Amino acid sequence: MNDIADAFYKLKIYCETEHFKGWDPYDGLNSKIFQAIPLLKKSVLCRLMVIQGFKRCPFNMRRMAFVPKEYNAKGIGLFLSGYCNLYKVVENHPQLSEKMGTLEMIKARIEELAELLISLQSKGYSGACWGYNFDWQARRLFLFPKFTPTVVATNFCATALMQAYEITRNKHYLEIALSAADFVIKDLHRTPYNGGFLFSYSPLEGNDTVFNASLLGSRLLSYCFYYTQQEEYKRLAELSIKACCSGQREDGAWVYGMLSVQNWVDSFHTGYNLDALIAYQELTEDHAFNGYIEKGFDYYVNHFFEADGTPKYYDNRMYPIDIHCPGQLLITLTRLHKMKKYEELAKKVLQWTIRNMQDKKGYFYYQLKPGISSKISYMRWSNAFMFNAMSHYLLAI
């Protein structure tokens, strides 16, 4: 455990030194140069080229393009969740307080991040919700302007505030988190599917049939049901889960979404699906979908990890090796209470990741490829995600 705790500590120090601000794979449109050229801003093709150019380039062009380091709400939510886990880790292992911080210090950090997260809410919606700090052009189909709330970001942020409430007992955190149910119910639209429906990715048109997004909406409603016992939350969560489970393949896999351009099967979104299903099962005490969880987990654990611990992105090919893939394994094993059975796999994957994807400065790389890899430090995608994931591991072992 010492080597993994040391790697986590290095990451913690790096993120705290950066004050949790950073760049993102998709923040190319935040370039002040790009923003200063009106014709480029209006072109769908130019927006796509800029986003994909910055995302795919193995060399970081952001400083010369005047892309500022900023807070990302989902990233802050992941950090908040990670510090809540760390609080429990130190509570269980007081000897770690010398390195990781005392309970009082960690609690102060939790309160700091919770207040920051609350300040980053998107305004003008039915309940608390969060989006990203950059414009996002999804292929040529639709544009999400910066701070457009998404069900994905909102799920991670609201449930992190619930964790913060459990430690601080600050009811304000819980009240804001619970109001996110109104965002899911009133602001997202629904696509009917096989006796249920899929929640949309955001209040805007487009990206309406993504399985993991709809399931994360169900996950959030399940948490809200747990605290309020409002049956409507459980009913709507169940209908979304019913639709998404009907979309599970016979072999246990889920494609990303229902559009023809969304028919891939990948590692970490499969993990999202499983996390959402187990949350619904545990928080509502409805075990009707347990078979889908077990079938999905069997596919997940047998298709995305090599014998030497190398994590795969897709079920049918390895590259790019994305930092989300090993990170989500730690969360999925913890959430499904399978860490003890698969601890050897988790340790092997995590040690491979530390050895191959952690920089000596403490941050984690974005992706490894057969050629030139992207070793840029991305605060939300890489560091916040791994901080949260490794905190799950430390809490589970």
Image (tube, rainbow, N blue to C red):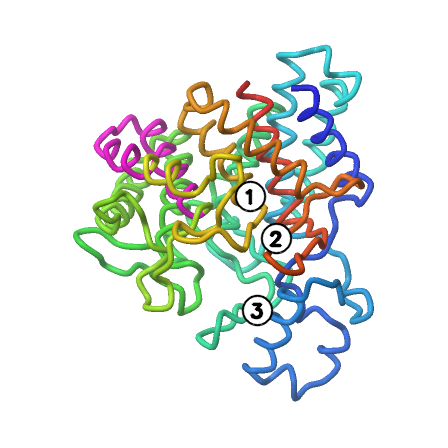
Question: Is residue 1 placed above or below 25 in the rendered structure?
Answer: above
Would residue 247 appear left or right of 331 to someone viewing this image?
left
Separation of marks 2 and 1 at Cα, in angstroms: 24 Å
Circle 3 SS class? loop
Question: What residue sits 23% from the left and 59% below the top?
Answer: 192
* Residue at which label 2 appears: 367
The magenta-colored residue range is 269-296
Question: Which amino acid, by three-letter code, is at mark 1?
Answer: Cys
Would residue 294 appear left or right of 224 to someone viewing this image?
left
Q: Quadrant of the N terminus?
A: top right
Would residue 394 appear left or right of 340 to someone viewing this image?
right
Which disc is residue 145 wearing?
Answer: 3
Examine the structure image and report whether residue 238 is included in the region drawn in magenta.
no
Q: Nearer the viewer, residue 162 or 288?
A: 288
Q: Nearer the viewer, residue 110 or 252?
A: 252
Which disc is residue 113 wearing?
Answer: none
Separation of marks 2 and 3 at Cα, in angstroms: 26 Å
| Label 3 Cα neighbours within 10 Å, binned few <14 / some 14-19 / many ≥20 | some
Question: Is residue 55 placed above or below 300 in the rendered structure?
Answer: below
Question: Which amino acid, by three-letter code, is at mark 3?
Answer: Pro
Q: Nearer the viewer, residue 148 or 5?
A: 5
Q: Quadrant of the C terminus?
A: top right
Question: What residue sits 24% from the left and 44% below the top?
Answer: 251
Examine the structure image and report whether residue 275 is included in the region drawn in magenta.
yes
| Label 2 Cα neighbours within 10 Å, binned few <14 / some 14-19 / many ≥20 | many
Circle 1 SS class? helix
Question: Which amino acid, by three-letter code, is at mark 2?
Answer: Gln
- Point out the tag, 1 or 3, that comes first from the N-terminus: 3
- Point out the tag, 2 or 1, that comes first from the N-terminus: 1
* Residue at which label 1 appears: 157
The reply to whether the C-beta atoms of the residues labelled 2 and 1 are less than 8 Å apart is no
| Label 1 Cα neighbours within 10 Å, binned few <14 / some 14-19 / many ≥20 | many
